[in-house]
Amino acid sequence: MKTSLTVLVLVLLLLSILAGCAPGPNPSRKMASEHGEFAGFWLGLWQGFIAPFVFVASLFKGDLNVYEVHNNGSWYNFGYLFGLACFFGGGGNRTSRRCGKSNIGAGAKIDD
């Protein structure tokens, strides 16, 4: 009885956390900024690349945004994610490498 109540509470807590992560609509999408411009692919690429630095700076200065809400939609998002991937090293290339091990001389040795 006690374990089933604990499991129920944990499941409800997990569902509440996941519901809080659901994306919502961007009302400023395709709406020009105060300068009359939209953020496109190239600005998304740049802002994605500098996002880790801007995030740290935004912890100390409240008027900085990590993400431009006045964007053109999918192209800005693609550039932003591509910029983040470039900053953090791209894809999963490191998973296929062995750390510190060499395959030189890994063949079978024959004793006479």
Image (cartoon, rainbow, N blue to C red):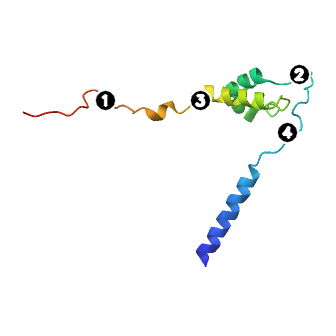
Mark 4 residue element? loop
Instruction: Establish if 43 lies above or below 66.
Output: above
Nearest to viewer (mark 2 / mark 3) = 2
Mark 3 residue element? loop
The 10 Å Cα crowd at callout 4, few under 14, some 14 to 19, many 20 or more, is few
Kindly check if marks 2 and 3 are in contact, taking CB atoms under 8 A apart as contact: no
As measured in the structure, the alpha-carbon distance from the residue carrying label 1 to the one carrying label 3 is 28 Å
As measured in the structure, the alpha-carbon distance from the residue carrying label 1 to the one carrying label 4 is 52 Å
Quadrant placement of the C terminus: top left
Residue type indicated by callout 1: Asn
Kindly check if marks 4 and 2 are in contact, taking CB atoms under 8 A apart as contact: no
Residue type indicated by callout 2: Glu
Residue position for label 3: 88
Nearest to viewer (mark 3 / mark 4) = 4
Closer to the chain start, of discs 1 and 4, is 4
The 10 Å Cα crowd at callout 2, few under 14, some 14 to 19, many 20 or more, is few
Q: Is residue 26 visible?
A: yes
Q: Residue at x 69, y 25 (%)?
A: 50
Residue position for label 2: 37
Residue type indicated by callout 4: Asn
